Image (cartoon, rainbow, N blue to C red):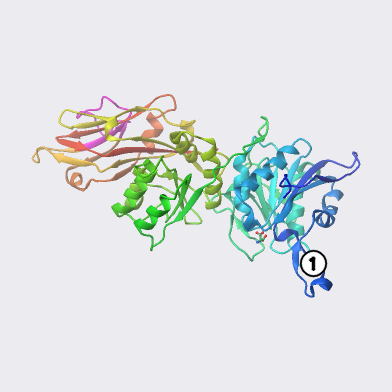
Amino acid sequence: MSKKMYGELHVEKMSESRRKSRVCLIYTGGTIGMVESDSSVSGSPRLRPATLVELMKAVPKLGKKEGIELGMVSFTRPVDSSDVLAKHWIEIGKAIEEHYEEFDGFVVLHGTDTMAFTASGLSFILNNLDKPVVITGSQLPIAHPRTDALANLTSAIYIAGHEAVGLPLIPEVVLCFADLILRGNRATKVSSAQWQGFESPNFPPLGRIGEHIKIRKDLCMSPNRRKFFVDKTLAGDVKVIPVNPGTTPQQLERDLKTTGIDGVILQTYGTGNMQTSPEFIETIWEAAKGGEDYDRRIPILNVTQCLEGTVEMGLYEASSGLLEAGVISGLDLTHEAAYGKIVWAIAKFKDSENLRNQLQFNQRGEQSENLHELSWRPEESTQAGAGDHIFASGKNIPGGFVSEDLKSAHIRIQKLKVEILDKSKAHSVRIFINNPNADEESSINEVNAVCEFVEGELSELGNIVRDATKVAETVINANNPVSVKLVAVNAKIYCRSIILSLYTAAN
Ligand code: ASP
């Protein structure tokens, strides 16, 4: 086994006058690099991974004509992408780092099976990119008469060597396949047979490939001019737990108690839902809060099993328990991006509260929104008088909250109980944000008032969720701590927790 995971750099040189761009190909294996083996030896044609030299022969004519000089490095032993592990992302990252200054862009040739995982992983570990990193592969081997490899590879080389062919710079990790240029950490494999094997269901393509290559510059990231570097440590043991109709609390407990586990991706239904019975929630609660049987808090990232849409814990009863237990929202991450993000973030952010926040913030364009979450437990709220109000005192909003980017806000009160003092008199409960002085006289029409529950509604209360977008837009800003006040009129109130979720656009 060679010390280096990838081989030496081979460069197809052009004269200075003709060269306009330099692109480095990094060959990792996959169907794209398969060639027919010698049939006279084996008796029947077989496919085998091409050597670097063989692959170079099949490739270079493409870019040369356009003034693109190609260099190529290869894994010492090209692999089926099923064998690509997170540690290989680091090897690819190191190859990019080593040759970063020599080239204008990079093309990673990769098997399709785990291509979206590698694209996601690379997007997190590569910091301050100002050059394209294009990952591609093919459904048929490069040697096959009907191969899609040549078209995919040519397009990828064009995108990486953009300047020579007059294309705009895409300074991020992209996945280029058939007609589409997708943000790498938004892509997911949708077909093992169609030419168009990938889609990015929650984000538009960055570009389309047809007679012309059309790139949506408005969607692409801006180049980051700070020094490029690669994060070289990733968490080793992240467990993926899909829930299904047969999942039992015992199974879940067994999975969560796996020794040495660094984190969990919980694959849930719809908007982040799963079985509601208390055994499930208690099991999750124990792991997420680091209960007796755990030596620390296990980060649990909630990702939807749906191809499209976002996790919104607390919308249904079937997810409010998870929210309260401290499960982290994976918003609209693909499962590939969720995996790349969590193994990267666990290694990078050591403090559990910070890790939670960083996982809920957009890092590399992998999700459509940031989630800034504020939560209060009862011990953090002061109950005065006869429990006629609950005050959740001022907390700073985590992350770089920008009021102008606010898209929506939701307030969730868990287990809100109301004891009416005198049924013959008017009674109600009102919720205010950033109005510590709110009292029985404070009107529901004030700008800080979120909502009011009156008379008959009070007996119905339990876990409630209300839209607080209008109020948040008016009274919340990054510089001031946020407080919540619940005021009861002619009643005593109690609640188990208050959670305010502020969603901002991920720019
Ligand atoms: N099993 C192959 C791989 O992922 C499939 C492909 O490349 O399309 O390496």
* Position in image of residue 277 (x %, y %): 30, 55
Question: Dot 1 lies on which element?
Answer: loop
Residue 47 shows in this picture: yes
The residue range painted magenta reads 429-449
Q: Position of residue 294 (x, y in %)?
A: 39, 43
- Which corner quadrant of the figure contains ligand 1? bottom right
- Give the answer, above or below, for where 154 lies relative to 487: below
- Along the viewing direction, whichever of 79 and 114 lies nearer the viewer: 79
Residue at the far front: name it: 1
- The residue positioned 35% from the left and 45% from the top of the image is 286
Disc 1 marks which amino acid? Answer: Ser
Answer whether residue 438 is magenta in the image: yes
Q: Position of residue 169 (x, y in %)?
A: 71, 41
Q: What residue does disc 1 label?
A: 37
Specify whether tag 1 is near ligand 1 (CB below 8 Å): no
Q: Specify whether 114 is left or right of 31.
A: left
